Image (tube, coloured by chain):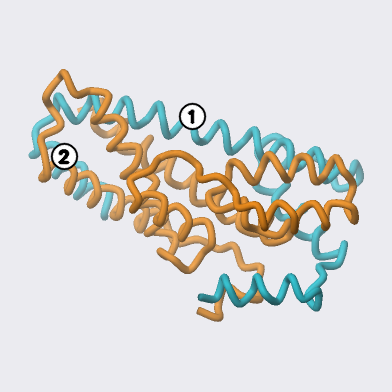
Chain colours: A orange, B cyan
């Protein structure tokens, strides 16, 4: 638990970990209900997308990161939308924003809306979590590309 | 739990982050962005620009996940489990 406290370590697991988690999620999906009914194509895409994000968060170490914790919590609630930030946090941020260049805070604000759980993060924490999130996200994209390529050139 | 702990510490003001630490983090982020990764050390990219590009990059990645989910959905609908299992064994090697 103390591991994520002080460090600015943004190392992520290897690709295999992401691939394994994602494929597990996918096969669970398939076991739960078949993905081949054509009228439910939209639902299916949504489920795969959710599986992608959830398995990514699990690969990244489950709840050991702020972003992965927020993502998993959001997924558990069955709510795909980014939750609204709490008012308390807004106040906290406004107070801080005086100290940093407004352009930077403005950009950080946009970043908060993109990184899961970003709304509750202090700017430096936000940047650290963002770095980790980006690494995981691009790894997840690579894994998905691999699977898509593998399936389409059989 | 650790999140709560760190939050209370932040509000107490004892852990004010120095500008140096912020700059380090900005550089760390910059190295992750395809757009800015290759820029020379001499021409310094502003923090705002790095954050802006970070947003763009994340949006692109989200879009890619969307597209790939769509393609996967199509592919899995037309692929039997045997093939999926084959892929699985290939990927986990």
User: Residue at the location (67% across, 56% down)?
Assistant: A89
Q: Nearer the viewer, mark 1 or mark 2?
A: 1
Q: Is residue A145 left or right of residue A9?
A: left
Callout 2 secondary element: helix
Answer few, some or many: residues within 10 Å of disc 2's Cα (few below 14, many 20 plus, some between 14 and 19): some
Q: Which residue is drawn at 59% across and 62% down?
A: A10
| Residue B85 placement (x, y as % from top left) | 14, 44
Chain of the residue that carries numbered disc 2 in the rendered image: B
Chain bearing tag 1 is: B
> Which of pointers 1 and 2 lies earlier in the amino acid sequence?
1
In-image side of B18 versus A125 (left or right): right
Q: Residue B71 at what x, y percent from top left?
A: 31, 25
Quarter of the view holding residue A103: top right
B25 and B13: which is toward the camera: B13
Instruction: Rate crowding at label 1 as few (under 14), some (14 to 19) or many (20 or more) other CA atoms within 10 Å.
Output: few
Q: Is residue A85 left or right of residue A32?
A: right
Query: Residue A104: percent from the left, percent from the top?
Result: 82, 44
Tell which of A112 and A8 is nearer to you: A112
Q: State whether residue B80 is above or below residue A142.
A: above
- Disc marking residue B34: none
Q: Name the residue under label 1.
A: B63
Q: Is residue B24 above or below residue B42?
A: below
Q: Are marks 1 and 2 in contact (CB under 8 Å)?
A: no
Residue that appears at 91% across and 45% down: B42
Residue at the disc numbered 2:
B84
Residue located at (61% from left, 75% from top): A5
Q: In this view, does B73 lie above or below B48?
A: above
The number of numbered badges drawn on the structure is: 2
Q: Secondary structure beneath disc 1? A: helix
Estimate the x, y position of residue A139 in percent, counting from the top left: 46, 47
């Amino acid at each position: 638990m103390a591991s994520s406290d002080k460090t600015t370590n943004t190392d992520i697991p290897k690709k295999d970990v992401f691939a394994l988690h994602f494929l597990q999620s996918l096969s669970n999906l398939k076991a739960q209900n078949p993905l081949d009914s054509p009228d439910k194509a939209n639902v299916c895409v949504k489920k795969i997308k959710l599986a992608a994000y959830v398995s990514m968060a699990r690969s990244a170490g489950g709840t050991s990161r702020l972003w992965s914790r927020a993502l998993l919590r959001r997924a558990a609630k069955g709510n795909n939308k980014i939750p609204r930030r709490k008012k308390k946090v807004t106040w906290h941020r406004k107070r801080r924003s005086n100290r940093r260049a407004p352009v930077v805070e403005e950009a950080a604000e946009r970043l908060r809306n993109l990184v899961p759980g970003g709304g509750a993060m202090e700017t430096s924490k936000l940047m650290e979590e963002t770095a980790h999130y980006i690494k995981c996200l691009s790894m997840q994209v690579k894994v998905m590309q691999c699977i898509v390529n593998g399936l389409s050139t059989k | 739990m650790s999140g709560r702990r760190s939050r209370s510490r932040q509000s107490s003001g004892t852990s004010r982050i120095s500008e140096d630490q912020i700059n380090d983090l900005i550089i760390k982020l910059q190295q992750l962005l395809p757009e800015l990764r290759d820029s020379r050390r001499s021409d310094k990219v502003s923090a705002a620009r790095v954050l802006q590009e970070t947003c763009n990059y994340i949006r692109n990645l989200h879009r890619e996940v969307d597209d790939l989910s769509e393609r996967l959905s199509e592919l899995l609908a037309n692929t039997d489990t045997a093939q999926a299992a084959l892929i699985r064994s290939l990927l986990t090697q």
